[in-house]
Image (cartoon, helix red, strand yellow):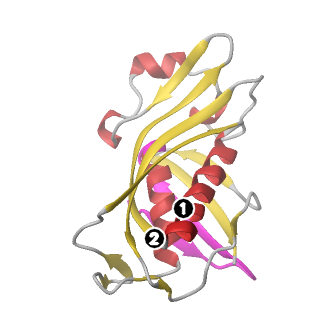
Amino acid sequence: MKPFELIAHTADLKIRVYGNSLPELFAHAVVAMFQCIRPIVSACRYQKDLLVCDELPVTRHVKIISVDLESLLVDFLSEALYLSDVYDEAYLDATIEQIHEMNPTHGLKALVSGTPENDLSVEASRKLEFSHLSGYCKPEFSGNKITIQATLHGIKIEGFEVVEIKAVTHHELQIKRQPNGWQADIVFDI
């Protein structure tokens, strides 16, 4: 499965991201966001239109809490974009430690973590109480929040070749569970 592709869009930048698991989808989304705008880094090289670096010495830890899965993705990417702007960095890999739903009165309701090989256990999938993890992503929360904890891996940059992203948008945003994994369409304001 390819991690992402660029989708034609009239005025903005649109990508379609794929992942075998929800954590992998989020990791691919942050990588795709930076790969599409082509960071300029003298210590790295481009191979098949992707920036390849022998090492990614910068790490940034993020924890985001949002009201639903779509907002979590937008907020997560927006935080990566903010950190990129502040520190002149591009993040070309991400480790998603966990994505989980929190209920203010009952604590943790569901936990999604790990690698594609260990995505959702049978035990965990029985406990999932929010519809967006088991099918088309149309979350219906009743006061619950969803959170992500991740580490971004990156490198100092000199700028971007293509364009700078102004904002991550909710416009045309879709997160879907497919038979073979997850898919998200994301539009960036440029």
Q: Position of residue 67 (x, y in %)?
A: 72, 36
Magenta part of the protein: which range?
A: 1-23
Residue behind mark 1: 83
Which residue is pictured at 30% across the width and 76% down the height? 52
Q: Position of residue 24 (x, y in %)?
A: 42, 49
Kind of residue indicated by mark 2: Glu
How many numbered discs sit on the rendered protein?
2
- Image quarter where the N terminus lies is bottom left
105 drawn magenta: no
Mark 1 neighbour density, 10 Å: few (under 14) some (14–19) many (20 or more): some
Mark 2 neighbour density, 10 Å: few (under 14) some (14–19) many (20 or more): many
Front one among 136 and 111: 111
Front one among 123 and 77: 77
Kind of element beneath mark 1: helix
Task: Please determine whether, in this image, residue 53 is positioned above or below residue 92.
Answer: below
- Marks 1 and 2: in contact by CB < 8 Å? yes
Q: Residue furthest left?
A: 54
Classify residue 59 by image quadrant.
bottom left
Lower sequence index among marks 2 and 1:
1
Kind of element beneath mark 2: strand
Q: CA distance from mark 2 to mark 1?
A: 7 Å
Task: Please determine whether, in this image, residue 140 is positioned above or below residue 166.
Answer: above
Q: Position of residue 180 (x, y in %)?
A: 44, 47
Classify residue 145 by image quadrant.
top right
Residue behind mark 2: 89
Q: Position of residue 159 (x, y in %)?
A: 50, 84
5 drawn magenta: yes
